[in-house]
Every structure is written in structure tokens, then in C-alpha cells.
Image: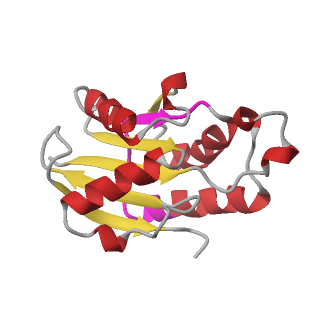
């Protein structure tokens, strides 16, 4: 069976000036709506996840909370290392998780999460299919033939606010 990697940037968050600090920034009403739409889009594709790798920041956790029931309530890992993680750190986290499970959802921040999505899209020759900058709430879904990230296939990409 193919492995599935779902990559999502957190949904629209309040401005930095509206929160005590960056870590505590929550979602705006549009962010909540886009998260619900993203979850519905993933459910419409029949996708589930066994593990969730989620930045512990408030906006990523709120985004994931909208997805979780529609993805089968995957086990969540939210180490501080995922907060503003680099593309390379996210890639290593996904590879580590694929040792135990075959379906992963990852909710994170730019530039890391968008960088990983664009890197995988480039590996399968469809980088132009992903939106520039990887806007908030953008989701991309990749199938992987094995536990590596070397030969992905892009299944779907969407931005709920579009």
C-alpha cells in the first residue's frame, strides 16, 4: 500500500499585534472556516491519517482540531521542534514517522511546510501545481511508493479560501 503524506499550512491567524506572543496566535473566523473546508476536502478524498505531526503553536493546533475528526482522530505528536521547523526538519520528522505508520498529516508553518510541499512537488515534476508562497490553509497530498520521500506522486492540492 502506498504511504500518504498530507501537508497543510495552518489556517489564517490573528495579527501578531492581537496576541501576547507569536506562539499564542489563534485562528481568525476565516481561519476556522478554511480549516473546516480543508477537513471536508480531505474527507471527500477518503483520506485518513494514523499519525499527526503538528506544531504546538495555538494556530496549528486549532487548525488540526478541525481536521482530526474527519481524518480518523490520528495520534498526535506536537514536539516543540515542529514550531517554525525548517523544510529539512519536517522531512526528517516525516521519515521518522513513516517507520511506524503509513498515513501522516503534518500541520505547520511557512516557510518550512510550504518548502517541503514544493520540494516534493518538484521531485514529481509538478511544482507549478502548487500555489506560490503556499498560502494559509493550503493542503497538498502526496502518495509515496515506499518509506522514503524520493518518488512522490501529487494526489491533490487545494487552498480552501480560493
Count the numbered circles shown. 0
Residue 79 visible in the shown view: no
Q: Quadrant of the C terminus?
A: bottom right
**Which of the two residues, 120 or 64, is positioned nearer the viewer here?**
120
**Which of the two residues, 41 or 109, is positioned nearer the viewer here?**
109
Residue 47 among magenta residues: yes
Whole-percent x, y for residue 155 in the image:
28, 64
**Residue at (53% x, 43% y) in the render:** 68
**Residue at (73% x, 37% y) in the render:** 22
In this rendering, is residue 31 above or below 125? Answer: above
Left or right position of 154 against 112:
left
Whole-percent x, y for residue 33 in the image:
69, 62
In this rendering, is residue 39 above or below 82? Answer: below
Q: Which residues are magenta?
A: 41-56
**Residue at (31% x, 29% y) in the render:** 97
Whole-percent x, y for residue 51 in the image:
39, 34
Residue 89 visible in the shown view: yes
Residue 13 among magenta residues: no
In this rendering, is residue 41 above or below 2? Answer: below
Amino acid at each position: 500500500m502506498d504511504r500518504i503524506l498530507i501537508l497543510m499550512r495552518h489556517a489564517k491567524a490573528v495579527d501578531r499585534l492581537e496576541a501576547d506572543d507569536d506562539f499564542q496566535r489563534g485562528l481568525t473566523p476565516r481561519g476556522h472556516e478554511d480549516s473546516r473546508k480543508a477537513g471536508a476536502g480531505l474527507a471527500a478524498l477518503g483520506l485518513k491519517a494514523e499519525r499527526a505531526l503538528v506544531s504546538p503553536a495555538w494556530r496549528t493546533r486549532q487548525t488540526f482540531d478541525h481536521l482530526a475528526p474527519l481524518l480518523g482522530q490520528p495520534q498526535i505528536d506536537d514536539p516543540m521542534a515542529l514550531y517554525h521547523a525548517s523544510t529539512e526538519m519536517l522531512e526528517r520528522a516525516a521519515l521518522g514517522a513513516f517507520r511506524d505508520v503509513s498515513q501522516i498529516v503534518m500541520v505547520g508553518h511557512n516557510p518550512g511546510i510550504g518548502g517541503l510541499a514544493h520540494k516534493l512537488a518538484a521531485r514529481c515534476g509538478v511544482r507549478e501545481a502548487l500555489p506560490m508562497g503556499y498560502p494559509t490553509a493550503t493542503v497538498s497530498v502526496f502518495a509515496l511508493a515506499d518509506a522514503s520521500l524520493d518518488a512522490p506522486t501529487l494526489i491533490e492540492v487545494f487552498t480552501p479560501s480560493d
